[in-house]
């Protein structure tokens, strides 16, 4: 079943247009990886879905409803949760409060504080600490947990690996299957292609604000991914896979 | 003993200053909003109490039951209808709009109530006091003001630290875009904060009116003291606001005692000096959060 259907999406900031006619479909239950170089428009795409950047043209149909004009604070109630780039925990709230506030306007469902702590046991002893004293990996776990608390149908993960040690990234990625099992469809944005392709059931590559490649990781040759990522003259097969 | 008395009276006066400063501190803490009409709103609250007491024959204390909800609703509506449009990284629009609002309030009060000084009469309790020693007596009204100030600030602190609403206030204060991701409607929350700010300043205005006479143009002076209390205590800090108010109150009465004992000095002057010293040595205030 199609959960999200984006058609002809344009978006940008001021005079700068970041996305040009993006078409992306997300099927319920899948883990879609959006890859692309720095500045390709991945983060903007997620921010448009979460309502932080307005839609200039095109439609965003989520579960049958066009949400392009829905305000950001109403989207979490529909089941869209963004884990923003840079974690963005609330510095004057404790870890526990950061998690609880995730459920402020969320939906009922299986995710509660205990369920989140089961997936990220490392944050259990940190609950009463102010969030700004946590390490980057701990903060990222809290940020993902905070999004889960709203019981999202679609969880948007922006650069989970950014600025973290490889071993920490690995442990965070190990938690992703639990998200899918909990009923959430995952759309993750990554620069770390290897990490993303390990968990993804499908991939979309952005290049300068346009979709340059789409397919299943197992079916797309690495050379095509590299070409689509860097905008090199396409190797054989990039057309066939899109 | 006169000096000890000055300090005791200063603490009582500080209760009133803290009550004035509460709303200013809350609005700044939650939405970085500087309300230059704050003093005029206190005076407006006092005049609303004048109308309520004369129309219904109520005791000014009892009139709070009507004055506070009226001011709360006014604050909520003004934030939604006007102030929200001025909130941005640039503080100038909000300063200009509230400056203008202050002038409007002053002139509406002048037209409606004339320039005559008014007072709110609560009866004989106004002159009754508790005698501690031969030289020190605490008036009931200043004592009640201080107790109310501590209660209001304590309730505010509890709300901010323990309730979902307070959690939302702190989250929005930290980072409005991310708070929206949590489903928090920041604009509506700002309106709630402004409603609370108006409610507290209305209480302050009514206590001012019970304590002393007031006129339509007295707002700016109250704004100045409220500002000084907030800055001394620390912007956005609830207990800092109380500490700032008390310190400013003591500065005023000690300054006044200087005048009595040595023939020079004045209360407000010493208050301003304390404010300057704090601003110069600890700009974030005594209990303020570190500058971010």
Image: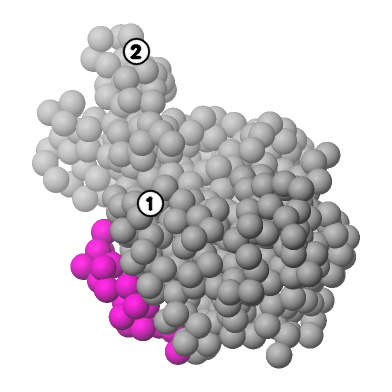
Image position of B25 with respect to A116: above or below: above
Q: Residue at x 53, y 39 (%)?
A: B213
Q: Which residue is mark 1?
A: A164
- Pointer 2 chain: B
Q: Nearer the viewer, residue A55 or B34?
A: A55
Within 10 Å of disc 2 (Cα), the crowding (few <14, some 14-19, many 20+) is: some
Residue A55 horizontal side relative to residue B158, left or right: right
The magenta stretch spans which residues?
A110-130
Q: Is residue B144 left or right of residue A161?
A: left
CA separation, marks 2 and 1? Answer: 61 Å
Relative horizontal placement of residue A134, taking residue B231 as reference (left or right): left
Q: Quadrant of the C terminus of chain B?
A: top left
Q: Which SS type dominates the magenta stretch? A: helix
Snapshot quadrant of residue B154? bottom left
Marking on residue B265: 2
Mark 1: secondary structure: loop
Q: Given this view, does label 2 or label 1 mark the residue nearer the observer? A: 1
Q: Is residue B58 visible?
A: no
How packed mark 1 is, by other alpha carbons closer than 10 Å (few <14, some 14-19, many 20 or more), is some
> Where residue B9 sits in the image (x, y, percent)?
27, 37
């Amino acid at each position: 079943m199609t959960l999200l259907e984006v058609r002809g999406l344009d978006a940008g900031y001021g005079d700068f247009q970041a996305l040009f006619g993006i078409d992306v479909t997300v099927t319920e239950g899948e883990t879609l990886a959006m890859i692309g170089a720095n500045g390709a428009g991945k983060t903007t795409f997620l921010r448009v879905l979460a309502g932080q950047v307005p839609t200039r043209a095109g439609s965003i149909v989520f579960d049958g409803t066009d949400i392009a004009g829905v305000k950001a604070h109403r989207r979490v109630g529909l089941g869209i949760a963004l884990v923003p780039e840079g974690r963005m925990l609330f510095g004057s709230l404790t870890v526990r409060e950061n998690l609880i506030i995730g459920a402020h306007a969320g939906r009922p469902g299986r995710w509660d504080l205990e369920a989140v702590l089961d997936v990220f046991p490392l944050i259990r002893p940190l609950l009463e600490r102010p969030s700004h004293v946590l390490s980057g990996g701990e903060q990222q776990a809290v940020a993902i947990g905070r999004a889960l608390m709203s019981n999202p149908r679609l969880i948007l993960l922006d650069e989970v690996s950014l600025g973290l040690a490889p071993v920490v990234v690995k442990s965070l990625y190990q938690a992703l299957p639990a998200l899918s099992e909990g009923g959430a469809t995952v759309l993750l944005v990554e620069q770390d292609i290897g990490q993303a392709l390990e968990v993804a059931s499908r991939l979309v590559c952005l290049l300068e604000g346009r979709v340059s490649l789409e397919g299943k990781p197992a079916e797309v040759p690495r050379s095509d991914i590299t070409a689509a990522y860097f905008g090199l003259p396409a190797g054989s097969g990039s057309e066939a896979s899109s | 003993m006169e000096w000890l008395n000055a300090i005791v009276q200063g603490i009582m006066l500080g209760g009133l200053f803290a009550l004035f400063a509460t709303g200013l501190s809350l609005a700044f803490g939650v939405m970085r909003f500087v309300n230059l009409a704050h003093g005029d709103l206190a005076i407006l609250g006092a005049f609303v109490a004048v109308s309520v007491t004369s129309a219904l024959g109520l005791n000014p204390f009892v009139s709070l039951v009507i004055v506070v909800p009226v001011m709360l609703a006014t604050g909520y509506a003004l934030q939604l209808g006007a102030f929200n449009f001025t909130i941005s990284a640039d503080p100038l629009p909000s300063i200009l709009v509230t400056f203008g609002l202050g002038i409007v309030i002053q002139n509406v009060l002048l037209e409606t109530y004339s320039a005559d000084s008014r007072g709110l009469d609560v009866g004989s309790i106004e002159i009754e006091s508790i005698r501690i020693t031969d030289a020190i007596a605490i008036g009931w009204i200043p004592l009640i003001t201080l107790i109310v100030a501590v209660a209001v600030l304590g309730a505010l602190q509890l709300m901010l630290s323990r309730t979902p609403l307070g959690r939302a206030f702190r989250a929005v204060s930290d980072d409005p875009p991310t708070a929206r991701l949590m489903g928090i409607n920041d604009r509506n929350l700002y309106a709630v904060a402004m409603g609370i700010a108006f409610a507290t300043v209305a209480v302050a205005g009514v206590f001012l009116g019970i304590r002393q006479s007031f006129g339509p143009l007295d707002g700016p002076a109250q704004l100045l003291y409220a500002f000084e209390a907030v800055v001394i205590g620390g912007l956005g800090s609830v207990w800092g606001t109380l500490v700032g108010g008390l310190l400013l109150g003591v500065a005023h009465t000690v300054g006044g005692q200087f005048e009595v004992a040595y023939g020079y000095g004045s209360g407000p002057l010493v208050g301003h000096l304390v404010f300057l010293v704090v601003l110069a040595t600890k700009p974030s205030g005594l209990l303020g959060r570190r500058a971010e």
